[in-house]
Image (tube, grey):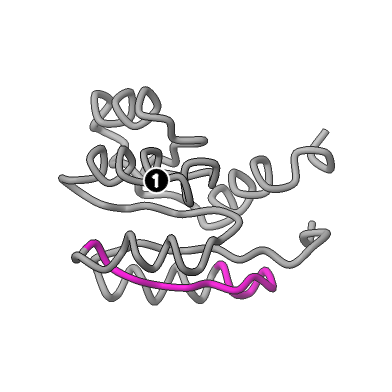
Amino acid sequence: MPPRHFIRLLLIEDVDDLQTVLQFSLGTSGWQVITTDSTQGWLTVAQEELPDVILLDGHSNQSAMLAQLKASVLTQDIPVVCLVPRDRLADQRQAQAAGAAAIVAKPFDPTILIEAILDIVEPETRN
């Protein structure tokens, strides 16, 4: 189902190949996908772009990054979807406790990821 409105998504991903695949997959939904990695400038990008949703695959520093997003007045209300390895249940629980709006286990089917994002951004159309 196509989104009812234009969605701006910030993708924070360090692996270039995965960033490219995700940008393409999400872009085919008609969304604007802004990309960055988890270097020092990622928080500034989030604060300047103010996307509808953030997709975070921050690897080992994901919880710290999520805490920084939630601590910033500019980004604290932006829902964050965290990508976490399927076999790292402790990391999944930690991301949820830190305020992630959704957790998507890797590897994943892109349609599952799109559905999770739509559930957050357009909940009124999902029932």
Instruction: State whether residue 91 is above or below residue 6.
Output: above
Is 21 placed left or right of 42 in the picture?
Answer: right
| Residue for point 64% across, 47% down | 115
Q: Nearer the viewer, residue 46 or 86?
A: 46
- Residue 16 in the image, given as x and y percentages of width and height: 27, 75
Tell me which residue sits at (33%, 59%) in the image. 43
Locate the C terminus by quadrant. Answer: top right
Q: Position of residue 37 (x, y in %)?
A: 27, 67
- Quarter of the image where one finds residue 13: bottom left
Quick one: SS at disc 1?
loop
Say if the magenta span includes residue 34.
Answer: yes
The percent coordinates of residue 20 (x first, y second) are 39, 77
| Quadrant of the drawing holding the N terminus | bottom right
Task: State whether residue 125 is above or below residue 24.
Answer: above
Front one among 19 and 5: 5
Residue corresponding to mark 1:
72
Q: Quadrant of residue 120?
A: top right
Q: Magenta span has 110?
A: no
Q: Is residue 91 left or right of residue 46?
A: left
Highlighted range, magenta: 26-38
Say which amino acid is labelled 1. Ser
- Local packing at callout 1 (Cα closer than 10 Å; few below 14, some 14-19, many 20+) is few
Quadrant in the picture for residue 60: top left
User: Residue shown at 50%/36% (left/top)?
Assistant: 102
- Horizontal side of 9 relative to 70 (left or right) equals right
Look at 57% across and 48% down and name the residue there. Answer: 112
